[in-house]
Image (cartoon, rainbow, N blue to C red):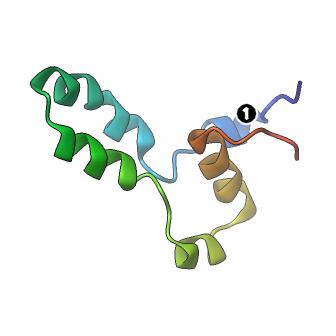
Amino acid sequence: MHLIPTHIRSLDPLNADRALRALPSMNARGDVRAIVRTLSGLVPSVGRLTDTPVDEASAMMRISGCSWDH
C-alpha cells in the first residue's frame, strides 16, 4: 500500500470537495443532468493536464480514484 503525501492529499485542483458535497441533494431530487454535469466537470481536459504541476496532477489522479504509485 502506498501512502499519499500530506501535501498532495490537501490539494483539490478540481474543486471536487465542493462539487461532491452537492451530490446527495442532486440524487435526492433525481436530477440526473446535474449529477452528470457535476461529475463530468471533474474530468480535466488534456490541455489542462499538459500545463498542470506534478503535485496537482497527482491530486487529480487521487480524486479520480487512480492508484498511488509515485
Q: Residue at x 87, y 42 (%)?
A: 69
Q: Residue at x 73, y 33 (%)?
A: 6
Side of 3 relative to 30 (left or right): right
Tell me where residue 61 appears, x and y as whole percent.
66, 48
Tell me where residue 59 appears, x and y as whole percent.
64, 47
In front of the other: 19 or 56: 19
Residue 43 to residue 65: above or below: below
Tell me where residue 14 appears, x and y as whole percent.
47, 52
Q: As shown in the figure, which amino acid type bears the numbered disc 1?
A: Thr
Q: Residue at x 68, y 66 (%)?
A: 53
Q: Residue at x 62, y 77 (%)?
A: 51
Looking at the rendered structure, the secondary structure element under dot 1 is helix
Residue 44 to residue 63: above or below: below
Q: Residue furthest left?
A: 29
> Can you say which quadrant of the picture contains the N terminus?
top right
Using the rendered view, name the quadrant where residue 25 is placed.
top left
Tell me where residue 40 appears, x and y as whole percent.
37, 54
Side of 2 relative to 24 (left or right): right
Read off the residue under disc 1.
6
